[in-house]
Image (cartoon, grey):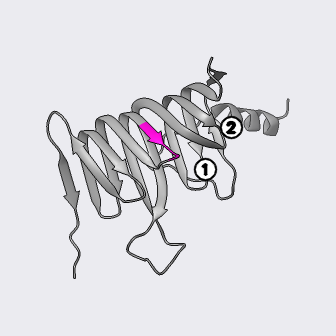
Amino acid sequence: MGRSAFLLLMFLVGMQPGYADSLGFNSDDTITITAERGWEGDEADVIHFSGKFELHAPDWSMAGDTAVVYGKLDNPDRVVLEGSPARISFLRKDDDNPDDADAQEKVDGAANFVEYFRATDKLIMRGAASLVRKDSNLASQLIEYDVDTDRYSASGEGGINIQFNPDDE
């Protein structure tokens, strides 16, 4: 085996799906799912994943230790994710730019347990939960978030912590 082939092999073996601070999105209509293991459940359209699960789509991404996808992989109804932490990122319409139909803002969430109802754009996060939006950070044991309306409910032992940057206007 030549030196260049050996170096290429070492590079490919060393590549692992990473857990960067911010999840990225696919640039086209492609959905990419990676994990160490995947299997179909007994129910129709239920797929389980374990070990370094990652899902990247054009407008949302998730990463965690385990995941269960309910519905079709290309357009699931619901995804349940667990990790230390499990993370989710998605793009939503930017309410500060109502005249620009393409304006989007990124929202990041993390918790020990994440349940995302893709069909209704509802998010439930439990256990060391945090939600980072445009100019605010929310932390609590339980966060429920409506992506469409940009409204949340938070509670749990230890209360809630909100940090935000007030508008300069």
Q: What segment is highlighted magenta in the picture?
A: 115-119
**SS class, disc 2:** helix
| Residue 117 screen position, x and y as percent | 47, 42
The quadrant of the image that shows the N terminus is top right
Residue 88 versus residue 12 in the image, above or below: below
Q: In the rendered image, which residue does mark 2 sit on?
A: 11
Q: Is residue 123 above or below residue 53?
A: below
| Residue drawn at 33 percent across, 49 percent down | 131
Is 121 displayed left or right of 40 in the figure? left
What's the residue type where badge 2 is placed?
Phe
Q: Which residue is mark 1?
A: 57
Q: Are marks 2 and 1 in contact (CB under 8 Å)?
A: no
Circle 1 SS class: loop
Q: Residue drawn 22% across and 82% down?
A: 169
Estimate the x, y position of residue 123 in percent, counting from the top left. Answer: 40, 44
Which residue is drawn at the image coordinates 68% and 58% (left, top)?
28
